[in-house]
Amino acid sequence: MSRLTMTGITKNFGAIRALSDVSISVAPGEVLGLMGDNGAGKSTLVKIIAGNFPPSAGDIRIDDKPVFFHRPVDAQREGVEVVYQDLALCNNLTAASNVFLGRETTRSLGPFRVIDYPAMNQRAAELFKQLKSETRPRDLVRKMSGGQRQAVAIARTLLSEPKIVLMDEPTAAISVRQVVEVLDLIRRLRDRGISVVLVSHRMPDVFAVADRIAVLRRGSLVASKATALSSPEEVTGLITGAIEAA
Amino acid sequence: MTTLDEIIGQSEHKSVLSRITGVPAFWVFLAAFVACLALTLMTDTFATPRNLFNVTRNFAFVAIIAVGMTAVIASGGIDLSVGSTVVLTAMVISILMAAGYSFALSAFAAICAALAVGALNGVLIAYAGMPPFVVTLGMLSAARSLAMVLSNNKMIYEFGPDHDLLLWLGGGSTFGLPHPLYALVVLTLVMSFVFRWTRWGQYVYAIGGNESAATLSGIAVKRQKVTIYMFSAFTAGLAGILMTGWLGSVTTNLGQSMELAVIAAAVIGGANLAGGEGTALGAVVGALLIEVIRNSLILLGISTFWQGMFIGTFIIVAVAFDRFRSHRN
């Protein structure tokens, strides 16, 4: 069984073909490293899975069920969560408030619905514990390290028991030590049976954590193979076009 | 060796004292208190019942609007049109009442006019994506002009059958406290609750903190922004009605450059002009400090022409203070 299957995905923006006939699948609990040069179509593919826009042609299946996403909410409902490159966090709010942003737990107080901060803090603490991250739910995100901020962004996705988590360049602008933390977080997601699609430029990170690597070049899929059977040299060749396909 | 559980479960253990001193409003309140104390000792006129009554009433008008302004500023916006909204609502209610309509109906129409101004501000800012500064600056001019057109620039001082009720509401007192103060207390209590405990309040801060994150989280940011500007206009409308009753007459220069005092009050009270911070109580305390200083200028015989200098300096110093604080972090 495969968690996510995409068949013949094509995306045109006017006369420009951003993706042509991309077919790819991800198994449950598999980490797929999606690589490619700037403009190769990585972001387009991720945005299609996340429901930002529909493909021009091709179909998407989740757990072998055909799905059609018109808006990001549709994708969320089918268990697709996204960790954005800039993490999309509010620095002025607490970690727990960020985890629950837009989905706050409320309880009724007479005729009013009030935010249930204790319940949110408790649930956020559980999620951080699952991620083995030393992040305190009541702390303001402004005061947090890059690794903790990543943990908050990833805990956000866990809130809805997702099937697939898309991560766009999670290790792009953080310190070496924090990269190690983030890669650990990705492994925790995998251990929980969640499929992860990791978009990254950083070869070592992808090789450290991905089970399989897919390479896009000028909108076409040129490789999709097990990490163990590949090498950074081969992937570099595939990205630049020195190697035609693998 | 501490376990992960302990670290996550740990909250910053703060004493009551450090909690209180961590709130910006506390220091502003302290400053206002010290100023009051100094004035009591330095002048014979400050601590008189009459003067204190005036101070509490005068500051209530600015404070009421400052609560609304705090919502706008905390969401990362600004509303320069509140002074003009004050005169527009005052004009609508006084014209209707002068024409013989009841207070309730006229007040309702006046609040609707204020909400319409806020809604137009909000729609232009949220849906057309125009900068709040520009939209509300335009509205500042447009709303006052509309008030002039409505009144034909005449002073209105006869308010029809409910004349006495209006004057009682705005200018009267119960248990020795002026009525606008009651309105302020209720508004502050309600909004303190709303800011802290409701989704609407949470989203005000979320939008001010990171608008794109709020959008990505599925929050209806545009709709929320419209309601925020409508709330700000509502507070201006409320103040406009009460001021009409207090003054007993309406002229078209009512509320002129009031927006500056309101913004200063909110900012002194801890609202961050960059968005994401601000409390209702802070806005009230900020307004109190401004009024005490304004009052002291008069009592100490300093020319009232200096008031503008003080308010302008306050805004700039408060923003500079914020800058230094964020640099240090």
Image: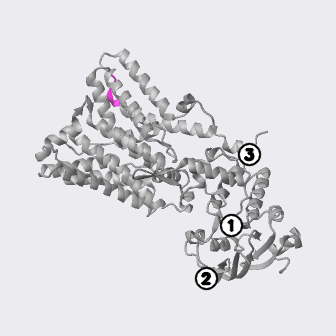
**Label drawn at residue A241:** none
Q: Main secondary structure of the magenta part?
A: loop
**Position of B78 relative to B188 (above/below):** below
Numbered disc 1: secondary structure: strand
Local packing at callout 1 (Cα closer than 10 Å; few below 14, some 14-19, many 20+) is many
Per the rendered image, the range of residues in magenta is B301-305
Question: Residues at marks 1 and 3, common chain?
Answer: no
Residue at 60% in and 33% down: B14
Do the CB atoms of the residues marked 3 and 2 lie less than 8 Å apart?
no
Disc 1 target residue: A166
**Which image quadrant for residue B175?**
top left
Using residue B296 as the reference point, say whether residue A119 is left or right of it: right
Disc 3 target residue: B4
* Of A18 and A84, the residue lying toward us: A84
Disc 2 target residue: A56
**Position of A152 relative to B162 (above/below):** below
